[in-house]
Structure formats: structure tokens, C-alpha cells
Image: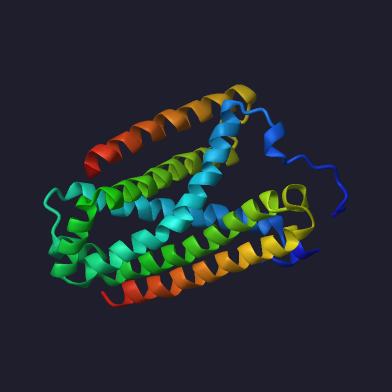
Amino acid sequence: MVSRVTNLGRSGLFHWLVQRFSAVILGAYMLCILGSTLLSPEMDYAHWKAVFDSNLMRMFSLITLLALCAHAWIGMWTVSTDYLTDLQLGTRATFIRLLFQAGCALLIAVYMLWGIQIFWSI
Amino acid sequence: MKDNRPVNIDLTTFKYPLTAITSILHRISGIVIFAGVALLLYLLQLSLESAAGFAEVTALLDNMLIKFLSWSVLAALLFHLIAGVKHLLMDMGIGESLAGGVLAAKLTLIFSFIAIIAAGFWLW
């Protein structure tokens, strides 16, 4: 019961879909940043800042940040409900798993707010 | 959903064919990335702050430990990306046989090995 309480979408199919949509966004962003870094051999501050300094890129960065948070939550939830169970940890499993998941949620919130701060201030 | 279904997720009793290795590496790389985002955000924030901050990041990346950590996160990202593309292709029904799965696992390992080595050369 407790493991299902932490399942935000309440549906495996929903998670499956979110994980794939967010993956495509994350992959596209990674290739975009990698490409713009590799294609400019003389990378300096002005070039680097210019990569992120447009409304289009700001949107792309923030949407990617959102995708990262969703993707990370589903991934860490999946891993923790597989490997932090009574099978491995005995009777304390639920407590340890919830503690781990709370830590993940906290870190995700930090990433989200920190990322917004970074991309908004460019 | 019944909660008393028989399950076996005891990793010590598993056999590990190539497909299982890429699957577990996909999970491990995901965990590494999740922690590594903190480093990436820190470096990104510093590098975008000012020209002095950018120079500081360049200097930080000359530090062996930071360089190695960055390479590790980059390696995890590259593997996760390539294994993820494999996942999406299989979702589309491409290579959904046992032979296809083994071949896809091999290609994932080969491509990511090349990409990770290339990333190392690029960083160093």
C-alpha cells in the first residue's frame, strides 16, 4: 500500500509515457548543448553565455529542467521500490524506502528551484 | 493488483546475460546522473555568472578530481542516452526478438564505450 501511495500518477502506463516524453526532451537538449560546445572550438565566456541567452533557449532549458525532475522521480521511484523492499531490508524496508524517496523528492525540488534561478538570471 | 504475487528481484540469484548488464548499467547510470546534476548545475551557474566565473570553471576542470568526476557524469549521461535510444527503438517494435535484444545490447555497449572514450579525450 505504502509503495503505491508514493506513485504520483497512480498509473504505470502514465509513468511509462512521461518517462519516454521526458527522455526525448532530455536527449534533444543534451545533443543541442553537446553540439553547440563541440561546434565552436574557441569556447569563451561570451560564446558560452550566448548559447543560453535567448528566450527560445531559456524555454528549452526550463522545459528540460521540468523533464529532468519528472524523469528523475520516476526513475528513482522505480529503483527504490525494486531494491529497497522487505526482501532486501526486512521489516524496516518501508521506513528506509520512504526516507530515501523523501530525500530524492527534496533533491529534485532543489534542482528545480536552483535551475530556474540559473536560467532565469542569464 | 494482488500483493502476494511471487517475485524474485534478489540480484544475487540472477544470471547476467548482456541484455541484463546493459539494463542494470542503465539504472546505475541514472543514479549517477541524478547525483551528478548537482555538480553540473554548480559548474553551469559559475560559468554563466561572469567571465571570472567562467575562468574559474576552466581552472576547476584542470583539477584532476573535478575532471574525473565530470567525466564520470558525462560517461553516465552518454551511456544513459544511448541505452535510452535503444529503449525507444524497441518501443517502436524494432529489434524485439531475443537475437535483436542481444544485438541491441552489444551495439549499446560498443557505441557508449566509443563515446565515453571520446569524451575523455575531449576533456583531457
Image coordinates for residue B60, horizontal then vertical, percent: 22, 57
Expressed as whole percent of the image width and height from the top left, the position of residue A86 reads 77, 52
* Residue B93 in view: yes
The residue at the point 22 percent across, 47 percent down is: A38
**For residue B60, side relative to residue B99 (left or right):** left
Q: Residue furthest left?
A: A42
Q: Residue furthest top?
A: B99
Q: As drawn, is A45 to the left or to the right of A17?
A: left
Residue, x 72% and y 32% (percent of image)?
B13
Q: Residue at x 46, y 44 (%)?
A: B80
Q: Residue at x 47, y 61 (%)?
A: A68
Q: Position of residue B99 (x, y in %)?
A: 60, 22
Which quadrant of the rendered structure holds the C terminus of chain A? Answer: bottom left
Q: Quadrant of residue B10?
A: top right
- A11 versus B91 height, above or below: below
Question: Is residue A34 among the parts visible in the rendering?
Answer: no
- Residue in the foreground of this view, choosing between A19 and B35: B35
Tell me residue A27's x, y (percent): 42, 50
Q: Is residue A104 above or below residue B74?
A: below
Q: Quadrant of the N terminus of chain A?
A: bottom right
| Up-down relation of residue B4 to residue A98 (above or below) | above
Q: How many marks?
A: 0
The way the protein has been coloured in the rendering is rainbow
